[in-house]
Image: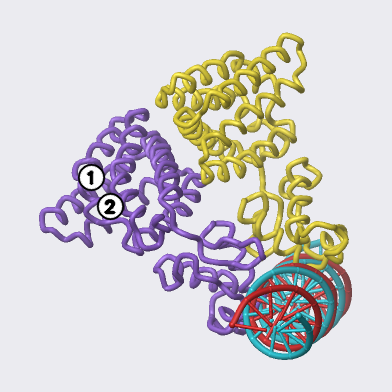
Chain colours: A purple, B yellow, C cyan, D red
Amino acid sequence: MSSGDRNVRVVTKDFVYEQIKQKIITGSLQPNENVVEESLAKELDVSRTPLRGALQQLEHEELLVRKQNGRLKVAPISATEAKEIFMIRSRLEGLVARDAAERATKKDITYLKHITKMIEDAEVQGIQEDQVYFGMKFHTYLYEISGNKTATKLLNLLNDHINRYRRLGLINRAEQLDKNKDDHALILDYIEKGDLEKAELFAQDHVNSSMEAAIERIKNSQFVKQN
Amino acid sequence: MSSGDRNVRVVTKDFVYEQIKQKIITGSLQPNENVVEESLAKELDVSRTPLRGALQQLEHEELLVRKQNGRLKVAPISATEAKEIFMIRSRLEGLVARDAAERATKKDITYLKHITKMIEDAEVQGIQEDQVYFGMKFHTYLYEISGNKTATKLLNLLNDHINRYRRLGLINRAEQLDKNKDDHALILDYIEKGDLEKAELFAQDHVNSSMEAAIERIKNSQFVKQN
DNA sequence: CTTTGTATAATTGTATACAGTTATTTTGCC
DNA sequence: GGCAAAATAACTGTATACAATTATACAAAG
C-alpha cells in the first residue's frame, strides 16, 4: 500500500497495528489462533515490513505471543492472567483517582457530576448501552485530569486486554454494573473533598468489586482448557 | 552480522535491543540525544532491519521517543515522569508483596530471612555495594514467589527507567538506603504472618519513602531545563 | 543582512529478494 | 502398514534497494 493512499501523515505500521488489534479484541482473530505474516500482509494489502512492526508492538503488549519455534499466535485467555490484570488495574485506577483528587478544578467536578447523573439516568431507564458508555467516560476523564501520563498509558494497555475478555463474552454487563450503582458518586465525593486517601481506596475497591464473578466465568469458558 | 555468529538461537533483534537499552540506561546514550538508524546499525554491525525492531521496542517502552518529524531520540528526563514511575512502582510492589504473602512457602520465608540478614550485615560493615545488591534481590525474589507475571513484567519495565535515573546519578544511594533499614524485616514479618493487607501497605510505603529526595535531585539536574 | 526558493544531502518508510529454520509430505525400506 | 530418512514446502530472519520525507546548504533577490 503506498502511503499516499491516505491523505494525512499516518505511517502504514500504525494503521495496520490498529486494525490487527481490533481484530484481536473483537475476536475476529481468536485466542490461540496462528498468525502468519504473509497471509495477514496480503489480507491487509501491505508488505511484510510495516506489518512486522505492528506485530512486534502487539507482541510487546502481549495480545500476541511468540511460540518456541518463532511463530506468532493470538494470546491465550486465562483466568489467572485476567485476575492479574484486574488487580493491577484496580491499583492504577486508585492512583489515578488520587492524582485527580489532588488536581481537579471546580469545572472538572461539575463535569464529573454531570457524567454521574447520566449514569444514574441510564440506569433508571434501563439503557445498559449508555450505562457502560458513561461509566467508561467517568474513568477516562479521571485519567485526563490526573495528568498522570504513565499510569494512563498502562491503563490503556490493560483496558485493551479487558475489552477483549468483554468482547469474547467473558465479562458480563450485569457483573460489571451490579454493585457499581453508587460507587461513582462516592468516589466523586472524595475527589471533591480533596481526600486523596479515600479517593484512591474507593476507586480501587470499585474495580475489585466487579472482578470475582468475571473470573469464574472465564475459568469455565470455551477458550480455557477444561481438565 | 550473520546470526550464526552466536551459537544458541538468539535473534539479532533481541541481542541488539539489549545493547541499546544498556547504552541508554548507563548514559552512553544521553537523554535527548538523537538516534540515527544507519549510524547505530553500522556501529553494532547489523543491518537496519533487526535494528529497527529493537528501536521500535525501546520506543514502546519509552526509553526512546519519536519526534514529530519521525526521528528518534533518547527519552528526556523529567521529575514529573520520575514521580509517576515511583508512584506506580510502589503500588505494584505492594501488590506483588500481597501475592507473595498469599503464596510464600516456609522455604521462601527462610530464604527471604537470609537475604534480610545479608542486607543488615552489609549495612553494619558499611558495604553499600552489597546493600544495594541484596536489596534488589529481596524485591526480585518477591516477584518470583508472587507468581504475578503481568505485574513482574511491568515492574521490570519501570525498573529500567529507574535504573537510568540511578545511573545518571539522579538517585542517591543514601536516599535509597536511609530509611529502609528495617523495612525489609517488617514486610517479611507480615508475609510470614500471611497478613496480605499489611504486607501490601508496607511494601508500598517502602518504595514511597525513598522517593521525595530523589525527585528534588532530578528537578535540579543538568538534564532538566532550568527555567 | 536577511529572506526566500531551490538544489542537495540525510534520514526514515516500504517493498522485495534471499538465507536460514521449522513443519510437512513423500519416499523407500523393513 | 509402520517407521525413518530425505525431499519439499511453509514460514520467519536479514539484507538491501528504492521511494518518500525532512533537513541542510547555498544562491539570488530584496
- For the point 56% across and 69% down, which residue is it? A14
Total of numbered circles in the picture? 2
Q: Residues within 10 Å of mark 1 (few under 14, many from 20)?
A: some
Q: Say what secondary structure mark 1 lies in.
A: loop
In the image, residue D5 above or below residue B94: below
The reply to whether the C-beta atoms of the residues labelled 1 and 2 are less than 8 Å apart is yes
- For the point 44% across and 47% down, which residue is it? A80
Residue that extends furthest to the left in the rendered view of this protein = A124
Q: CA distance from mark 1 to mark 2?
A: 9 Å
Residue that extends furthest to the top in the rendered view of this protein = B124
Q: Residues within 10 Å of mark 2 (few under 14, many from 20)?
A: some
- Expressed as whole percent of the image width and height from the top left, the position of residue B19 reads 79, 50
For residue B8, which numbered disc appears in the image?
none
Q: Say which residue label 1 marks.
A: A180
- Expressed as whole percent of the image width and height from the top left, the position of residue B93 reads 52, 32
Q: Is the C terminus of chain A in the top left, top right, bottom left or bottom right quadrant? A: bottom left
Q: Nearer the viewer, residue B197 or B163?
A: B197
> Dot 1 falls on which chain?
A
Q: Say which residue label 2 marks.
A: A135
Q: Amino acid at mark 2?
A: Gly
Q: Is the N terminus of chain A in the top left, top right, bottom left or bottom right quadrant? A: bottom right
Kindly indicate whether the residues beneath marks 1 and 2 are on one polypeptide chain. Answer: yes
